[in-house]
Each structure stands twice: as C-alpha cells, then as structure tokens.
Image (tube, grey):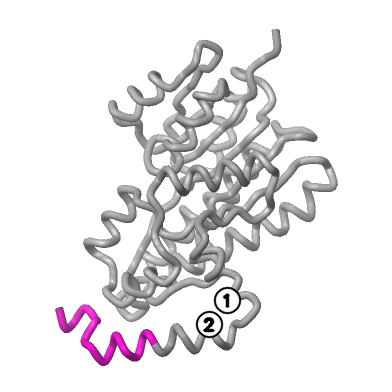
Amino acid sequence: MKTPPHCIISGGASGLGLGLALRLLERGYCLSILDLSFGESAKQQLSQAAASSAHWQAYTVDIRNAQACAEAAARAADNYGTIELAINCAGVILNCRFAEMTAEDFARVVEVNLCGSVHFASAVLPHMSAGSRLALVASMAGLVSNYGYAAYGASKFGVVGLATTLRYEYEPLGIGISCICPPEVETPMVESERQHGDPISLELKKFAGSLDTNTALNGIMRGLDTGRWMIIPGVRSRFTASLARYFPWLFNRVMQSMIRRLLHKGHHRSSL
C-alpha cells in the first residue's frame, strides 16, 4: 500500500494555512502543522477533514525560533517520513504610517514574516528530496507594497527575494519552489486590519481587489498542483502585478494620484 504523502504547514491553525490544511487532509495527506496555538475549532475542523488514510499532528512552535522549527520538522519527518510539500503560511501584518511605527514594530514584523520564512525553509529542506516542493507565502505587498506597509511590504519583498534565491539553489536538485502572493483575502487577520489599519492603505488595497477564502485557496491549490513558481490568485491581483512589473511608471502615477486625492479628502488617521 502506498504511503500517504507528507505535508508540513506553518500557521496551519487559522486563516489560509488552516484552509490549505483542510484541503490537503481531504486529499489524503498526512499533515504536520506548526503554529503558536491550536484552538478547539481548528482541531475539530482538522479532525473532521481527515480521510481514512490521512492523519495530522500539531506542533506548538514560534516561527521566530529557528531551533524550535528545526526540531519540529525533524520530529515530523520521523513521524510521517520525507516531506513532499512544505508551505510556510505563518505571518503577521502591521498597517500604519512610517512616522507612527516604532523600531520594535518593524523588527517584529520582519522577524516573523522574513526571518520566520528563513527558519521554516532551513528546517524543512534537509527532509525533502527530488520531487518535493517548498512554498513560501509572501503577498501582493511583496510585489507592489502599499501606503502604510513599510514593515509588512519590506518583509514580504524579502520573502519574494528569499524564494527566488532558493529557486536558483534547489530547483537544479529537483526540489520545486513556489512563491505565493495573494491579494487581500477574507481572513481573521484582514478583518483585524480593517478595524485598525490606515484609511489610505485600506482604500488603495481595493485596486488589487479582495478574494473570499475559497477562491484564494482554489487559485493556490491549482498553482501548487501544476508546480507554478509565482502563484497569484485572482484576476485583478494578476493585472496589478503585471502593471507594476511592466509599466512601473504608470503604476506609480496611478498610486500617487490616488494617494493625493485621498489626502485631499481627509482620508488620514488624524482627520477621523
């Protein structure tokens, strides 16, 4: 009997990470899930999604801790075997203007999003072989950034750069690399951002559009299934990324025009 494939996911107890975990369990994967905590609702959903041949194991890990990530990945490989798919979904967001941000704020976001991606990749790659795939979740903000995204955009640009280098180093060895850059997705993290984020940033995000969770997951899974390098779910988000890449002067002009209009209308925190 063929051994079920093994996937390890960070941030798999909520948001996109949980959604991907549920879909992979339904496909019969054995899952190793890393997260800071596991709520009862997440545990129940994961258990219900597990098919007869699927199993999952929770590892309480802070993605900022390189040693903890390495130890969890080693235990996961001992438990379920070679890692055939690894997805780093763990991340945090900070939406505020640069002048309002502290050095500690910036460091925390970079430590989780960028350094966490490094820790995850370093932990899982020794347990992967030819035919496996590593996917790092970046963001549209890693391609075009946004007003109020000094920390978040910098961290996600870094994730895109990291994934690019890993692609050069590991694809010749047969290990595929994917970089996932979704636009805004209806997750608890985004709901919180809408309550506390900078108004101008929230308005500009509408340019690339917003996706419901299922639509985003469909696009991500298609990209992983076909072995795509850059996975950008959503038609509007792909248009935005292409506009910024091929016509940067035009994209910048559009963004600057929108920002000036919003500032003129009083869309900044001090006016609310």
Is disc 1 in contact with disc 2, using a CB cutoff of under 8 Å? Answer: yes
Q: Is residue 164 left or right of residue 185?
A: right
Give percent across and percent down for residue 267.
24, 82
Instruction: Single out the residue that lies furthest toward the front.
Output: 235
Question: Which mark is on residue 206?
Answer: none
* Secondary structure found at label 2: helix
Residue, far right = 172
Q: In the rendered view of the protein, which quadrant contains the N terminus?
A: top right
| Figure quadrant of the C terminus | bottom left
Residue annotated with mark 2 = 251
Tell me the CA gap for discs 1 and 2.
Answer: 5 Å
Whether residue 266 is in magenta: the answer is yes
**Magenta segment:** 258-272
Could you tell whether 265 is left or right of 123 in the image?
Answer: left
Looking at marks 1 and 2 on the same chain, the residue that comes earlier in the sequence is marked by: 1
Q: Position of residue 82 (x, y in %)?
A: 69, 25
Query: Is 214 within the magenta?
Result: no
Looking at the image, which is closer to me, 155 or 256? 256
Tell me which amino acid carries mark 1.
Ala
Q: Main secondary structure of the magenta part?
A: helix
Residue at image position (32%, 73%) is 203
Q: Is residue 187 left or right of residue 119?
A: left
Residue type at mark 2: give it: Phe
